Amino acid sequence: MTNVLILGAHGQIARLATSQLLQATDHHLRLFLRQPERLTITDQAREEVVDGDVLDSAALTKAMAGIDVVYANLGNAKIEAQAKSVVAAMTKAGVKRLIWISTLGIYDEVPGAFGQWNHQMLDGGYLETYAAAAKVIEQSGLAYTIIRPAWLSNADTVSYELTQKGEPFKGTEVSRKSIADLVVKLINDPQQHIGESLGVNQPGTDGDKPSFY
């Protein structure tokens, strides 16, 4: 059994991962989020809900007690500050393993017309902020994996391939179910992909933009 702390537990991918973890593992899940009444708990014995803000360092550090793996499903304009808070709390609590959701394009790794479209769509400092947050994680000394999904769909499919930092990003889209599947695989085998930043896309989705745009 693994003790998992899920930050931003109401996010769509986080909820998919939670469901999969409850169905397919015996892990204990500590679900950290603001407004916890938004969550529906299905297994009282294995789901523990913590009402908190990631930027509240005392609450976050307390939530790290006894945790083996932290999965951070965060994201907004404060993502760099959130990254710093997570790193500080994990370091203070002595927790090493972190799975961090980021976005494609933070290394200017998306080639061609899709790369240009992606940059235009995520203009206004979005990519720069997420890149800064990823840099915080990469320099943290933690056993991290950064996940950089393509544009997310709600397709009922699990189909994905990976690219590494320094390689051109592939494809244009990927399902949230696929990202959740990768997160669960990393939680189940936490020695995988340590110190790596993974681009994640659905094979065969190359193009100038995702199919749903």
Image (cartoon, helix red, strand yellow):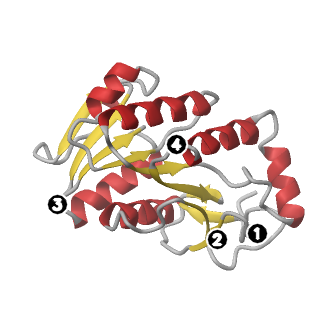
Q: Secondary structure at mark 2?
A: strand
**Under tag 3, what secondary structure?**
loop
Disc 2 and disc 1: Cα gap in Å? 7 Å
In primary-sequence order, the first of circles 4 and 3 is: 3
Q: Is residue 96 visible?
A: yes
Kind of residue indicated by mark 4 = Ser
Of residue 196 and residue 54, the one placed in the foreground of this image is: 196
User: Residue shown at 19%/47% (left/top)?
Assistant: 42
The quadrant holding residue 63 is top left
Whether residue 39 is visible here, answered yes or no, is: no
* Amino acid marked by disc 3: Asp
Tell whether label 1 touches label 2 (CB within 8 Å): yes
Work out whether mark 2 precedes mark 3 in sequence or the reverse, and give the earlier one.
Answer: 3
In the image, farthest residue toward the bottom? 204
Mark closer to the observer (4, 1)? 4
Residue that carries the numbered disc 3 in the rendered image: 26
Q: CA distance from mark 2 to mark 3?
A: 30 Å
What is the CA distance from the residue labelled 1 to the residue labelled 3? 37 Å
Residue at figure coordinates x 39%, y 26% from the top left: 34
Instruction: Report the side of 142 relative to 197 (left or right).
Output: left
Whether residue 111 is situated above or below residue 66 in the rendered picture: below
- In the rendered image, residue 172, in percent from the top left (x then y), is placed at 72, 65
Secondary structure category for the residue under label 1: loop
Which three-letter amino acid code belongs to the residue tagged 2?
A: Thr
Mark 1 sits on what residue? Answer: 168
- Residue labelled with disc 2: 163
